[in-house]
């Protein structure tokens, strides 16, 4: 029996764990208040994989769920206390060789506020609604060659 390779990431109200097992069969996922259990047969060799995770904090086991695809099993763990960041997935600080952070999906949501995101969306809309080059004001002949500055002199040729 081997543990399945897994990646995880944190969100404001949930934690996601992706068990990277191609062609998984007989998938069993058990959610407990402070634990997550995973087992399956995977690959062409039907290797038995089993993981047991003591979670960093409590989850709502009734709202947690999983989805199997041909390449992996994605688990959605609903946090019992939304808005509380998890610095790690496990209760213990020990490094597990089969577990890593999914940096492709990681987001530092603690520093974000909904108000700031709303302001960004308003700014984006404003930029999109602005006209094209035809609407730009005349810049008083900024491109005219006759309006040379006093310090514009011909540079000597390089030797």
Image (cartoon, grey):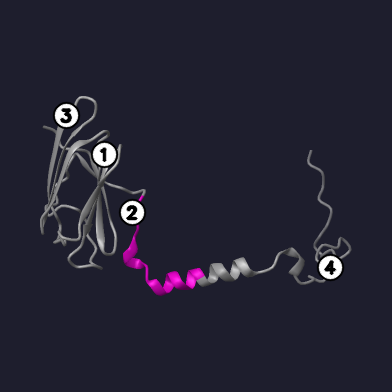
The residue singled out by tag 2 in the image is 106
Q: CA distance from mark 3 to mark 1?
A: 13 Å
Coordinates of residue 38 in the picture (x, y in percent): 15, 44
Structural distance between the alpha carbons of marks 4 and 1: 62 Å
Mark 4 surroundings within 10 Å by alpha-carbon count, few (fewer than 14), some (14 through 19), many (20 or more): few
Mark 4 / mark 2, whichever is N-terminal: 2
Residue 70 point in image, percent of width and height: 30, 37
Residue 68 appears left or right of 116: left
Mark 1, residue position:
20
Q: Which residues are magenta?
A: 105-121
Quickly name the residue at label 4: 141
Q: Position of residue 67 (x, y in %)?
A: 26, 47
Q: Quadrant of the C terminus?
A: top right
* Quadrant, the N terminus: top left
**Residue that carries the numbered disc 3 in the rendered image:** 47
Comes first in the chain, label 3 or label 1: 1
Q: Are marks 2 and 1 in contact (CB under 8 Å)?
A: no
Instruction: State yes or no: discs 3 and 2 in contact (Cβ < 8 Å).
Output: no
């Amino acid at each position: 029996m081997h543990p399945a390779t897994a990646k995880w990431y944190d969100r404001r109200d949930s934690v996601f764990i992706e068990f990277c097992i191609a062609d998984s069969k007989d998938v069993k996922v058990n959610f407990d208040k402070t634990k997550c259990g995973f087992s399956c047969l995977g690959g062409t060799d039907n290797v038995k994989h089993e993981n047991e995770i003591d979670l960093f904090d409590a989850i709502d086991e009734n709202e947690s769920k999983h989805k199997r695809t041909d390449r992996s099993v994605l688990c959605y763990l609903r946090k019992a206390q939304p808005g509380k960041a998890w610095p790690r997935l496990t209760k213990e600080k020990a490094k597990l060789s089969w577990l890593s952070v999914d940096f492709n999906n990681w987001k530092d949501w603690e520093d974000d506020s909904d108000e700031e995101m709303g302001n960004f969306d308003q700014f984006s809309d404003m930029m999109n609604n602005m006209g094209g080059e035809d609407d730009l004001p005349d810049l008083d002949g900024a491109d005219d060659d006759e309006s040379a500055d006093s310090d514009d002199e011909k540079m000597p040729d390089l030797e």
